[in-house]
């Protein structure tokens, strides 16, 4: 038996309305998806485009802090049984056509003539020279033996910081570690031992202590050891922003009268002033090895510059006097 299907009044309109709503929802979903993809793409583009990197004026020289020792790099090299020890050498022969030895000899000859002219210096006899040599060697031997165990302890405990530090380490960078002057106690023993050891033990030729509160006493400890760098190992030292002050500058100046290894020293932003500069100038007058010195940001003023000018800047090749209120 066949029966006729009857559609309820208004059913067609309801179905059409429902279909229209569903279509609108699908269209909205598609637009939202498209917008989300576009937004993600925009964010990715912004992330990929890095802002211009600000150049740190204090790290624009050839001894950038990233070139120095870091524990991760050292560990990688240790696994490969190699040690990262870039060569640091004098540029004086290439730039000036002379050497520190020649400069030192000429200065000694000039001083001898001046002493003879002033009659205020009596030359030592051969016997006196030999006696002085023996006494010096005996003194060096005592210091060498006294510094051996403390230096070895520093190698064993990584300067008390757990660093992979040993006699073959060529560079160490302790920039902005929150260190105090006591870190210099261990380092000074390492520097003293490697400077006097016979046969030579120790390879630390680059030391960076930048932005730590080393102060005057820490600076003095380091400098006292560097007076005896007979083996001429350490050639680069950065004590910038270490609050060494005038007294620290005096310690550096006194060290420069004897040290014959350091090629570059950085003392930026240390409140040295013109008084500290006078102490440095006094040391520079007797030093024929140092080639680069940075005194940036120490408020040395015109009078400090006059101290340096009086000794014709010593034997320096490069002297950084930026931000010192000169002129």
Image: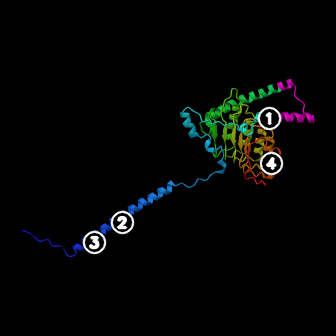
Give the image location of residue 223, x and y in percent: 74, 39
Disc 1: which residue: 104
Whole-Å distance between the Cαs marked 1 and 4? 26 Å
Disc 2: which residue: 28
| Quarter occupied by residue 177 | top right
SS at mark 2?
A: helix
1 or 3: tag closer to the N-terminus? 3
Give the image location of residue 256, x and y in percent: 77, 39
Give the image location of residue 160, x and y in percent: 63, 38
The N terminus sits in image quarter? bottom left
Front: mark 4 or 3: 3
2 or 4: tag closer to the N-terminus? 2
Q: Mark 2 Cα within 10 Å, few/some/many (few <14, many 20+)?
A: few
> Which mark, by number, is residue 275?
4
Q: Mark 3 Cα within 10 Å, few/some/many (few <14, many 20+)?
A: few
The magenta segment: 103-130
For image coordinates 54% across by 37% down, the residue present is 76
- Judged from this view, the residue extending furthest toward the bottom is 9
The C terminus sits in image quarter? bottom right
SS at mark 3?
A: helix
SS at mark 1?
A: helix
Disc 3: which residue: 17
Whole-Å distance between the Cαs marked 2 and 1? 86 Å
């Amino acid at each position: 038996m066949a029966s006729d299907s009857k559609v309820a009044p208004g059913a067609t309109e309801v179905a059409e309305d429902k279909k229209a709503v569903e279509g609108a929802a699908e269209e909205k979903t598609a637009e939202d998806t498209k917008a989300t993809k576009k937004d993600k793409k925009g964010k990715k583009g912004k992330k990929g485009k890095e802002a211009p990197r600000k150049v740190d004026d204090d790290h624009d020289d050839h001894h950038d802090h990233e070139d120095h020792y870091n524990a991760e790099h050292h560990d990688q090299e240790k696994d490969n049984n190699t040690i990262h020890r870039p060569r640091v050498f004098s540029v004086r022969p290439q730039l000036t056509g002379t050497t520190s030895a020649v400069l030192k000899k000429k200065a000694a000859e000039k001083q001898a003539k001046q002493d003879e002219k002033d009659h205020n210096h009596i030359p030592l006899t051969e016997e006196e020279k030999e006696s002085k040599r023996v006494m010096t060697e005996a003194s060096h031997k005592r210091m060498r033996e006294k510094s051996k165990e403390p230096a070895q302890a520093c190698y064993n405990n990584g300067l008390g910081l757990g660093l992979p530090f040993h006699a073959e380490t060529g560079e160490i960078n302790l920039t902005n570690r929150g260190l105090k002057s006591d870190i210099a106690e261990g380092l000074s023993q390492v520097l003293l031992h490697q400077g006097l050891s016979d046969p030579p033990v120790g390879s630390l030729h680059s030391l960076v202590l930048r932005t730590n509160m080393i102060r005057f006493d820490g600076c003095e400890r380091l400098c006292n050891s560097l007076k005896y760098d007979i083996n001429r190992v350490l050639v680069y030292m950065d004590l910038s922003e270490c609050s060494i002050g005038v007294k620290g500058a005096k310690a550096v100046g006194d060290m420069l009268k004897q040290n014959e290894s350091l090629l570059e020293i950085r003392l930026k932003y240390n409140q040295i002033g013109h008084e500290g500069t006078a102490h440095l100038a006094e040391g520079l007058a007797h030093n024929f090895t140092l080639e680069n010195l940075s005194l940036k940001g120490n408020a040395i003023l015109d009078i400090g510059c006059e101290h340096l000018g009086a000794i014709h800047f010593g034997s320096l090749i490069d002297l950084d006097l930026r931000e010192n209120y000169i002129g």
